[in-house]
């Protein structure tokens, strides 16, 4: 149901804030808080915990785009929440279904490798430029569809470059752009982002991104489902897009070698470039609550460390001297042996399906493999990229799953039990190594 507020009040917030519409779990609206590149200070994390306590029944979840999402948000609290968020310096994705007047074709939370600048190249300057320019910019809130940007600076492909509308992969000299990714079933179907085979140097990187989006702004599709960037790219093609960007920017890009994306994986633990340590805390399906959000903030302060959310719904602690002590402290509230690469969407709230993806994940044996469970073919948990992917559906009132192995459909219309048996068989004896 659309929220009714006076339009002049809404305009104050409409380009920066929105509530999305939920359809399950007795939740009407969600609030998706952008955390650019996943970096958040302990103080601001406590701020999220307070918002969650006050407005969202104390529940919170980390999304696959490094946001934090709250549910059970009441429409009448929206303006008060937005005012509190403004004070904390947060904005939201414009999931505008809750407001009849608002826009929805915005640039979503820019994702970035959580180790950027701690291990290897620091690309957070680009994340900041993207966020500062596009968030709340009225010229960029009515794109044909939402637009997803990822900045990749490691060899783990932890941001899942293939799934981005535009991924900028650092190659040591500049960024190699990959474009047109989208894993959902909407036209033209599952597409992995393709390399434009050029190098964009640092000084041109932001202008390059803005130019791609400016070109996309002119795209017209008959239906919203056909307006995604992947469909635009499908019709425009690699060569045309590259030439058009060069024409508009007045530059000629150097050519990059062709390459394939590495299989996506999560960081675990190890040494940073400065000799201190990082540690990735596994968070089952990204599910948290206000108490554990506050606990994470408290531990980061105790250890004088940084906090970065990951596209795998986990939390990285950076700049840690005593890794052993950190783990002991974290184990007071978390199961450190939980898998780090099992991800699931919020289908229990989303309402597109009756399938409960996060619950299904509980039945799948722990492993160090990439397991993605999406509630439907929109593929919010990137199941087509996973080693083991599940896509839920409801047929004749039954909850069923198609099972994909490395993107190929292995079986369809299985019950949870049948799907789990198939997965165990695939994992072999011992069901695959447990995450360390
Ligand atoms: S994959 Fe489908 S069910 Fe899951 S969050 Fe996305 S749209 Fe909702």
Image: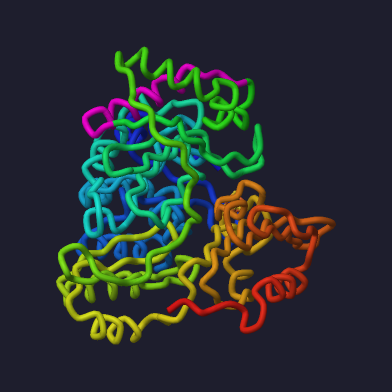
Q: Nearer the viewer, residue 433 or 50?
A: 433
Is residue 409 visible in the rendered image? The answer is yes
Tell me which residue sits at (80%, 59%) in the image.
413
Residue 227 in the figure: left or right of residue 278 = right
Placement of 141 over or under 331, stated as above or below? above
Of the pair 219 and 117, the residue shown nearer to us: 117
- In the picture shown, does residue 115 fall above or below 132? below
Q: Is residue 224 magenta?
A: no
Q: Residue most toward the front? A: 257
State left or right for residue 44 relative to residue 315. Answer: left
Q: How is the image coloured?
A: rainbow
Q: Which residues are magenta?
A: 201-221
How far across and how far down the image is residue 152, in percent?
36, 47
Q: How many marks overall?
A: 0
In depth, the one of 309 and 152 nearer the eye is 152
> Is 206 a magenta residue?
yes
Left or right, 370 with respect to 79, comes to: right
The C terminus, quarter of image: bottom left
Q: Position of residue 296 (x, y in %)?
A: 28, 72
Q: Is residue 182 above or below residue 283?
A: above
Residue ID at (34%, 32%) = 199
Q: Is residue 422 left or right of residue 350?
A: right
Q: Is residue 31 visible?
A: no
On the image, the x and y values in percent for residue 271 come to 24, 69
Between 374 and 86, the residue placed more toward the observer is 374
Q: Quadrant of the N terminus?
A: top right
Question: Dominant secondary structure of the magenta stretch?
Answer: helix
Q: Where in the figure is residue 5, as x and y percent of width and height?
A: 41, 37
Residue 132: image quadrant is: top left
Rendered residue at 38%/28% (across/down)? 255
């Amino acid at each position: 149901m659309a929220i009714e507020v006076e339009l002049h009040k809404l305009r104050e917030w409409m380009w920066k804030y929105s509530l999305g519409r939920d359809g399950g779990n007795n939740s009407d609206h969600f609030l998706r808080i952008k955390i650019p590149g996943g970096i958040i200070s302990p103080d601001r994390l406590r701020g999220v915990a307070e918002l969650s306590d006050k407005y969202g029944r104390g529940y919170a979840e980390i999304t696959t785009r490094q946001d934090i999402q709250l549910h059970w948000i009441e429409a009448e609290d929206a303006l008060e929440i937005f005012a509190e968020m403004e004070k904390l310096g947060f904005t939201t994705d414009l999931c505008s279904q809750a407001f009849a007047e608002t826009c929805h074709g915005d640039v979503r939370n820019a994702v970035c490798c959580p180790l950027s600048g701690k291990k290897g190249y620091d690309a957070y300057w680009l994340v900041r430029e993207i966020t500062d320019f596009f968030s709340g910019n009225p010229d960029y809130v009515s794109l044909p569809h939402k637009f997803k940007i990822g900045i990749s600076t490691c060899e783990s492909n932890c941001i899942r470059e293939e799934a981005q509308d535009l991924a900028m992969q650092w190659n040591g000299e500049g960024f190699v752009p990959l474009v047109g990714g989208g894993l959902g079933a909407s036209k033209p179907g599952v597409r992995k982002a393709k390399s434009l085979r050029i190098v964009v140097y640092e000084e041109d990187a932001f202008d390059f991104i803005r130019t791609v989006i400016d070109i996309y702004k002119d795209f017209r599709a008959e239906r919203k489902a056909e307006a995604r960037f992947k469909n635009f790219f499908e019709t425009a093609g690699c060569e045309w897009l590259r030439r058009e960007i060069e024409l508009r920017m007045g530059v000629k890009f150097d050519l990059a070698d062709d390459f394939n994306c590495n299989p996506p994986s999560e960081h675990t633990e190890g040494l940073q470039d400065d000799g201190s340590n990082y540690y990735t805390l596994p968070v089952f399906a990204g599910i948290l609550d206000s108490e554990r959000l506050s606990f994470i903030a408290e531990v980061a302060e105790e250890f004088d460390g940084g906090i970065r959310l990951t596209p795998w719904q986990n939390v990285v602690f950076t700049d840690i001297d005593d890794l052993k002590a950190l783990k002991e402290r974290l184990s007071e509230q978390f199961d450190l042996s939980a898998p780090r690469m099992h991800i699931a969407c919020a289908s229990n709230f989303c309402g597109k399906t009756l399938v409960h993806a996060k619950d299904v994940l509980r039945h799948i044996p722990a492993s160090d493999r990439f397991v993605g469970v999406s509630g439907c073919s929109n593929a919010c948990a990137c199941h087509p990229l996973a080693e083991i992917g599940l896509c839920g559906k409801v047929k004749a009132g039954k909850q069923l799953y198609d099972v994909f192995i490395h993107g190929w459909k292995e079986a369809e219309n299985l019950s949870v039990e049948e799907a789990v048996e198939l997965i165990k068989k695939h994992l072999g004896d011992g069901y695959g190594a447990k995450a360390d």
